[in-house]
Image: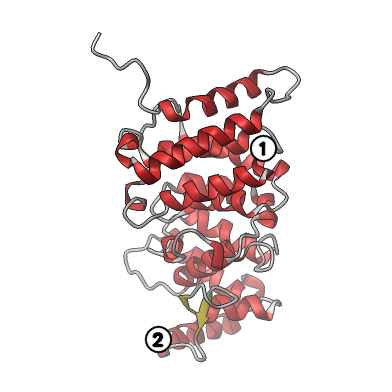
Amino acid sequence: MGEPLLPTDWPFLPLIHLYHRASDTPSGLPPTDTVGTAMRVLQWVLVLESWRPQALWAVPPAARLARLMCVFLVDSDLFRESPVQHLVAALLSQLCQPQVLPSLNLDSPLPGLTSFPDLYGNFLDHFEAVSFGDHLFGALVLLPLQRRFSVTLRLALFGEHVGALRSLSLPLTQLPVSLECYTGPPEDNLDLLQLYFRALVTGALRPRWCPVLYAVAVAHVNSFIFSQDPKSSDEVKVARRHMLQKTWLLADEGLRQHLLHYKLPNSTLPEGFELYCQLPPLRQQYLQRLTLTMLQNGVSEI
């Protein structure tokens, strides 16, 4: 008594049922009329978002994002349908509006969802298996990787699904949010910074494959190797020095130039960032001291 007859996310219920039915089908085949059902749900939600937004105020933006992800998890073909693509893209743009985006909180408990990181892990599995570089799929993969969200999500991609980087080919110009949402503030998780650096130097992360995250990784690695924070632990200081030494010795001149001369993010440029023509004096002096130490101690110690 006193409870509503329908849950707060009632407009999404047919889509959620579609996802569960497809998951429970032994053959793995989705139910019949999957496209029609998905389209009607997405059309109805878009009508509410556009004309009656107050009807969805009880559904947090993060819960709406999770429901959109279900469209891609139903099977390997639904998201390829042109009408579905247009509708999901329109709803994604609604979630990325400046007045809505700050309310997107992926750390709070979501109705009907045990754990967003678990859902995101399944989403990455599916992306690797069936996306073939689909840009809309890639945009939904990238959205939770913003700097303000849990580092667990970024670690999941760079630690457990690094193979997905080759398919994240969404152009910088099609990123639904500002690139600065990913590059600031500077990353402070040492494990993730080391994964960024490893992906860059091994060639797993390249600008022509994954332009957005290439720009993001270069930004954070550059900030880390030139950081002079006196409060850093000994472990961080050693890791910073070794990373800068290895950067200086890179055979890939293009990557070396990017990591050393990175200046600011700029999504209008092909690389996604501006470069210093010459290093600022403080950075130049720090690099000279480091290279002098390398020569004195011998490169073999690196």
Q: Where is residue 16 in the image (x, y as percent from the top left)?
A: 52, 26
Q: Which of 253 and 24 is in front in this view?
A: 24
Q: Where is residue 154 in the image (x, y as percent from the top left)?
A: 51, 50
Label 1, on which residue? 78
Residues packed near mark 1 inside 10 Å, few (<14), some (14 to 19) or many (20 plus)? some
Rendered image quadrant of residue 170? bottom right
Please tell me whether mark 2 sits on a helix, a strand or a loop: helix
Which residue corresponds to the image point at 29% horizontal and 38% vertical from the top-left?
A: 54
Question: In the visual, does 227 lie left or right of 16?
Answer: left
Label 2, on which residue? 282
Residue found farthest to the right = 27
Whether residue 160 appears in this view of the structure is: no
Question: In the visual, does 18 lie left or right of 112?
Answer: right
Q: Where is residue 33 in the image (x, y as percent from the top left)?
A: 67, 27
**What type is the residue that disc 2 sits on?**
Leu
**What type is the residue that disc 1 sits on?**
Leu
Q: Nearer the viewer, residue 60 or 191?
A: 60
Which residue corresponds to the image point at 45% horizontal and 42% vertical from the top-left?
A: 46
Q: How far apart are marks 2 and 1 (CA)?
A: 54 Å
Which residue corresponds to the image point at 35% horizontal and 37% vertical from the top-left?
A: 60
Q: Do the residues labelled 2 and 1 touch (CB within 8 Å)?
A: no
Whether residue 49 appears in this view of the structure is: yes
Residue found farthest to the top = 1
Tell which circle, 2 or 1, labels the residue nearer the N-terminal end: 1
Please tell me whether mark 1 sits on a helix, a strand or a loop: helix
Name the image quarter holding the C terminus: bottom right
Q: Nearer the viewer, residue 259 or 274?
A: 274
